[in-house]
Image (cartoon, rainbow, N blue to C red):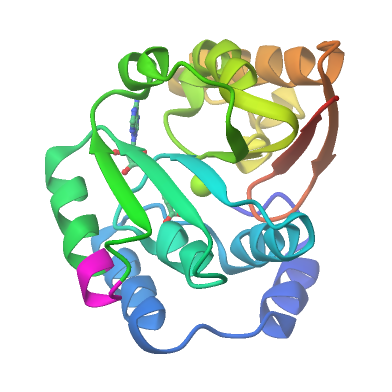
């Protein structure tokens, strides 16, 4: 479901440059197999932020088939990405795609649940974190993300308006109520946290960009 007027979405999508080659193939694969990869306009936003901020050490939470990790790594050979994926089968597909893109030296897929993997990271050295997995658990991942993000680093959180349901009870679906409640709490937390400056954009499925203050 769109969170925006359909004509606005269509216009933004039509204006966003299309991917080619392997990334295009991954989009087709994702559509056929219902893999929830980033929407093209969301990915474009992340790519532009990376061009501006030039992060070198990136952490992605939620690899899926490696689509966003490959697109980001292709921006610069200086980018090093660690990407966490819970599903063994997804991680295997992602590693194959990363090899096909010849980016094995830039992207490491870590198989495991983000809440366990994140607690093992110790130093605050990530320049950028892309949160894109298990929307109901963003709140649990957040303290770790704040801890391992360097001062001056960027946290981008995807799907935070969750098909519009986060913003209004009129779209409320009972079986999604825990996710919606958790996302609302997450938004309050990233907005109110002293360490972060956050802005919400109604792009794709809703994106938040947070800056960890120096
Ligand atoms: N970032 C990807 C899309 C990720 S889709 C892209 O844009 O191309 C979300 C992924 O998160 C799914 O593959 C799912 O298996 C994974 N996931 C869900 N819960 C997780 C968790 N707790 N830890 C790590 N990965 C998780
Ligand atoms: Mg997403």
Where residue 27 sits, quadrant-wise, is bottom left
Between 173 and 44, the one lying in front of the other is 44
> Image height check: is 30 above or below 1?
below
Percent of width and height locating residue 120 = 36, 15
> Image height check: is 187 above or below 171?
above
Percent of width and height locating residue 107 = 35, 55
Q: Who's the residue at 46% across and 16% down the image?
A: 122
Q: Is residue 136 left or right of residue 151?
A: left
Principal secondary structure, stretch drawn in magenta:
helix
Q: Who's the residue at 73% across and 54% down the image?
A: 203
Q: Is residue 16 left or right of residue 213?
A: left
Q: Who's the residue at 56% across and 71% down the image?
A: 75
Q: Who's the residue at 70% across and 44% down the image?
A: 207
Region in magenta = 98-102
Where residue 49 sits, quadrant-wise, is bottom right
Percent of width and height locating residue 139 = 57, 14
Between 3 and 71, the one lying in front of the other is 71
- The verdict on residue 7 being magenta is no
Q: How many marks?
A: 0
Quadrant into which the C terminus falls: top right
Find ligand 1 in the image and state its quadrant. top left
Task: Return the residue found at the far bottom.
Answer: 21
> Image height check: is 109 above or below 39?
above
């Amino acid at each position: 479901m769109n969170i925006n007027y359909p004509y606005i979405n269509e216009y933004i999508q039509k204006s966003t440059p299309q991917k080619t080659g392997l990334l295009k193939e991954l989009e087709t694969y994702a559509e056929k197999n219902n893999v929830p990869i980033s929407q093209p306009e969301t990915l474009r936003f992340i790519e532009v932020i990376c061009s501006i901020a030039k992060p070198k050490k990136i952490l992605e939470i939620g690899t899926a088939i490696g689509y966003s990790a490959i697109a980001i790594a292709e921006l610069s050979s200086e980018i090093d990405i660690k990407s966490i994926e819970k599903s063994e089968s997804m991680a295997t597909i992602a590693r194959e795609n990363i090899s096909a893109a010849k980016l094995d030296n830039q992207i490491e897929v870590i198989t495991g649940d983000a809440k366990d993997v994140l607690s093992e990271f110790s130093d605050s050295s990530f320049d950028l974190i892309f949160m894109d997995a298990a929307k109901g658990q963003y709140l649990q991942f957040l303290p770790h993300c704040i801890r391992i993000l360097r001062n001056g680093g960027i946290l981008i959180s995807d799907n935070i308006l969750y098909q519009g349901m986060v913003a209004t009870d009129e779209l409320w679906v009972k079986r999604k109520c825990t996710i919606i409640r958790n996302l609302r709490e997450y938004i309050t937390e990233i907005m109110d946290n002293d360490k972060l400056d956050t802005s919400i954009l109604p792009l794709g499925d809703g994106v938040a960009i947070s800056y960890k203050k120096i």
